[in-house]
Image (tube, helix red, strand yellow):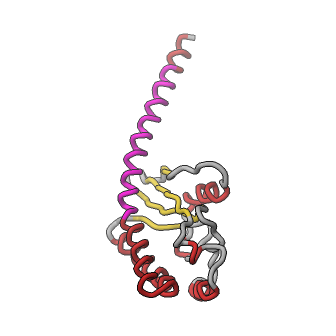
Amino acid sequence: MKCIGIILILFFATSGHAESKWSDIEASKVQEAKKVLMPLKKQLKGTLQTSVKEKGLMGAISACQIQAPQIQGELLQKGVKVGRTSHKLRSLANEPKDWMKGPLKEYAETHEGKKPAYQLVALENNLYGYLEPIYAKGMCLNCHGQNLKTEVAQKIKALYPKDQATGFKEGEFRGFFWAVLGD
């Protein structure tokens, strides 16, 4: 009986330590992920805003198609693995990795209540996957909303024949920014 008590004490003592260690890792990885995602988010938003201002919505669609993969590619060359994905893809290049599929489904199906601000997933080889939700906002709805202008819908269809990334409402979950981080 004394042995069982000692085992239980050791179990609870080490499980608390494991939780504490995960909390430390999580805090560190979340901070790192936000830092590595910032250039992607900032450049995408800047590109989109500049293109809309200079070329209008139609020019912005073309700019987004060309420049979004270039921005991601430039960051990848610097050793930063970041990107975007969705349950409703526009570009097949943004197809979710296996570790992203569960959280994508969970967020897409959860319509009530508050969703976590991020998800951190322990991957193989001491890597961590970070997911930060993207919600449809005003400017996004011009190309991702329910009531697209005819010329916008036609342009999107021409550039992305298999597009699924429309029909979103203001504030609706649209996908994730993601990052893969080392140990």
The residue shown at (67%, 57%) is 109
59 and 103: which is toward the camera: 59
Let me know if residue 35 is in the magenta part. Answer: yes
Segment tinted magenta in the rendering:
9-38
In the displayed orientation, state which residue is furthest to the left: 78
Relative to 112, is 126 on the left or the right? left
The residue shown at (48%, 50%) is 122
Q: Position of residue 26 (x, y in %)?
A: 43, 45
Q: Position of residue 9 (x, y in %)?
A: 50, 19
Q: Position of residue 127 (x, y in %)?
A: 43, 54
Residue 154 vs 112, above or below: the answer is below
Residue 28 vs 7, above or below: the answer is below
Q: Position of residue 65 (x, y in %)?
A: 49, 82
102 and 163: which is toward the camera: 163
94 and 60: which is toward the camera: 60
Let me know if residue 99 is in the magenta part. Answer: no
* Residue 88 image-quadrant placement: bottom right
The residue shown at (40%, 80%) is 50
* Residue 82 image-quadrant placement: bottom left
How many badges with numbers are in the image? 0
